[in-house]
Image (spheres, rainbow, N blue to C red):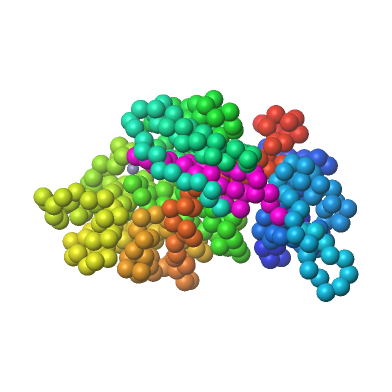
Amino acid sequence: MDSTTGSGHAIRGIKRIDLAYVELASSENARDINRDIVLEIIRSQQPISRADLARTSGLQASTVSAIVEQLINEKWVKEGAIARRPRGRRPTLLSLNEELVILAADVRPHQAIVALLDLNGRFLAREVVPLVSDTERSIAKIAASMKSMQAEHADRSCEGIGISMPGRIDPESQRLILAPNLKWGNYDIKRSLEKKMLLQVELANAANACLLSELWSGKLDGIRNAVLITVSEGVGGAILANGQIITSRSGLAGEFGHSPVDPQGPVCGCGQRGCWEVFASSNAALRYYAEACPGAKSVGIQELLRMAEEGDAAAVAAVSRQAVSLGRGLRLLTAALAPEVILIAGDITTSWSRFGPLIQAELESTMLAGPAPRLGTTNDGELSRLRGAAAIVLQRHSAYNRSKPGSGRRARRA
Ligand SMILES: [Zn+2]
């Protein structure tokens, strides 16, 4: 059984065996994989009885019982209510243990949103932390906010820290290697925060974090190919291909925002001219507005969107131009990846009823073959980066991932 249990794809063919990078099946990693599958079924179907877990997973009842005992000992799962049944035994139901919490931060160029979430993604605390130009001081401010949240919820036990970053993180070094809109240089964010917080820190690209949050929410159930685009100061992207999030070499996959669109265009944060994001980001809409109304007081993106909602012609024109640019870029990535679904996260989604149709029309105007991908917005707008950052922590702390580094179980042949 593979980890896509329940997705309903009966015919998937035989997976290619890559002898340069194989992992032999041992009884230990089979147990780790089964443990993670049982935990995922509990997470998505809670509260659930052991008998239903066995039925859903296809594992033997004794195996399920042993795994559940391990998960209870590890504090991931707790026994709760007794199920109501008309007759027969009344089983104890299992749920995720909400005493376990995760600290998360959504880092943006000028501010970070820091939050404390339980395993079900419920927010126990949330705070906006303004950032400064000095990276070390910014990290110290994030750590101070996290420490005060921990102190306020001292009865809970914190599993780790997940950070959503507006850039790409090398999976090996866990260093930020590309973040044109965040001037943090080569600073080791992970190590600095781990030293301050004494908890393990996981970094994730913001678009990948949003995509993971959507996958965890179940909104993409049954979808194997999707693209998620974050639209804020810049334009980021995440790719789901054949059911897997694609990160590729050095974690750099998905940087559609820096595809060259017009070599004569404005200079981008990455140093090149005319990238897609200089035409399609929230900053682009602000620039269009400033160009059309020289001398008008400078506004932020939420104010511009509010003005557009109220019918301000210049604001509508500026955001419409951004929306059309977004749609054009989506055509390019649809031609390349043929996703079933494209999800947009970020500022423009707050005025989706007005600007979504413009993006949709541009996307549909030239399809190579078949229907255009379904276009939509992420579940919970700005919160999905935080939920995704928390989900990254849970994913990295899965038994399978925990057993990987330096465990000697992995056979790697170069
Ligand atoms: Zn660029």
Q: Is residue 189 magenta?
A: no
Which picture quadrant has residue 46?
Answer: bottom right
Is residue 102 part of the magenta span, yes or no? yes
Residue depicted at x 69% and y 61%:
45
Residue nearest the viewer, comparing 173 with 276: 173
Q: In x, y percent, where is residue 246?
A: 55, 48
Quarter of the rendering occupied by the N terminus: bottom right
Residue 2 shown left or right of residue 395 in the figure: right
Give the residue drawn at x 77%, y 42%. 73
Q: Is residue 251 visible?
A: no
Ligand 1 visible in quadrant: top left
- Per the picture, the main secondary structure of the magenta-coloured stretch is strand
Task: Choose top left, top right, bottom left or bottom right for residue 89.
Answer: bottom right
Residues rendered magenta in the picture: 94-121
Looking at the image, residue 319 sits to the left or right of residue 123; the answer is left
372 displayed left or right of 220? left
> Residue 411 versus residue 110: which sits nearer the camera?
110
**Residue 258 location (% of width, % of height):** 36, 45
242 or 58: which is nearer to us? 58
Left or right: 151 in relation to 298:
right
In the rendered image, the quadrant that contains the C terminus is top right
- Of the pair 373 and 314, the residue shown nearer to us: 314
Residue 178 lies, in percent from the top left, at: 42, 36
Q: Is residue 104 above or below residue 374?
A: above
Residue 180 in percent (x, y) is at 36, 38
Query: What residue is shown at x 74% (from left), y 50% (from top)?
Result: 78
Against 61, residue 197 (above or below) is above
Residue 222 seen in the figure: yes
